[in-house]
Amino acid sequence: MDQFDLSENIIAQLGIESMPEAERVKMLEQVTDIVIERLMLRLMDSLPDDEVTAANALIGKPEELVAFLSSKVADIGALLDEEIAAVKNELFAAVGEAEDEE
């Protein structure tokens, strides 16, 4: 699998390229944390305990974690894309609901 650039994919899928850098960095950090948490929950049952332990040691280092998981999970890029899309849809739905309440 080619190198999966988590940050670039999140920025592209959320369409936040033109957001001011400070706001983009903050949003990127928050969304990355959510995506990684969801991915780990999704993979916990399919990975052996020792690999889950090794992956958990990389929490907080998303690019290293993705590199590690890509050596263990053949379709990691697709799984990450699915999780990023799910977070995006939830964010947009929440924004839509907030706007409806105004």
Image (tube, helix red, strand yellow):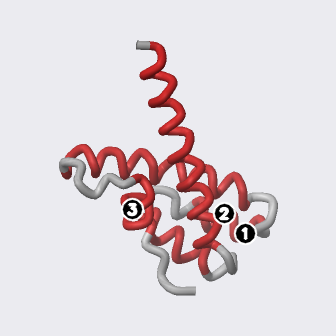
| Kind of residue sitting beneath label 2 | Thr
Q: Which of the 4 image quadrants contains residue 53? A: bottom right
Q: Is residue 1 above or below residue 93?
A: below
Which residue appears at 28% of the width and 57% of the height? 17
Q: Which of the 4 image quadrants contains residue 52? A: bottom right
Other-residue count near label 1 (Cα within 10 Å), few / some / many at <14 / 14–19 / ≥20: few
How much space separates mark 1 and mark 3, taking CA atoms? 33 Å
| Kind of residue sitting beneath label 1 | Asp
Q: Is residue 23 above or below residue 63?
A: above
* Rendered image: mark on residue 50: 1
| SS at mark 1 in the image | helix
Nearest to the observer: residue 2 or residue 100: 100
How much space separates mark 2 and mark 1, taking CA atoms? 5 Å
Which residue appears at 60% of the width and 59% of the height? 56
**Place of residue 97 in the rendered image (x, y in percent of width and height, measured from the top left):** 51, 24
Q: Which residue is mark 3?
A: 12
Q: Which residue is mark 2?
A: 53
Which residue appears at 41% of the width and 53% of the height? 14
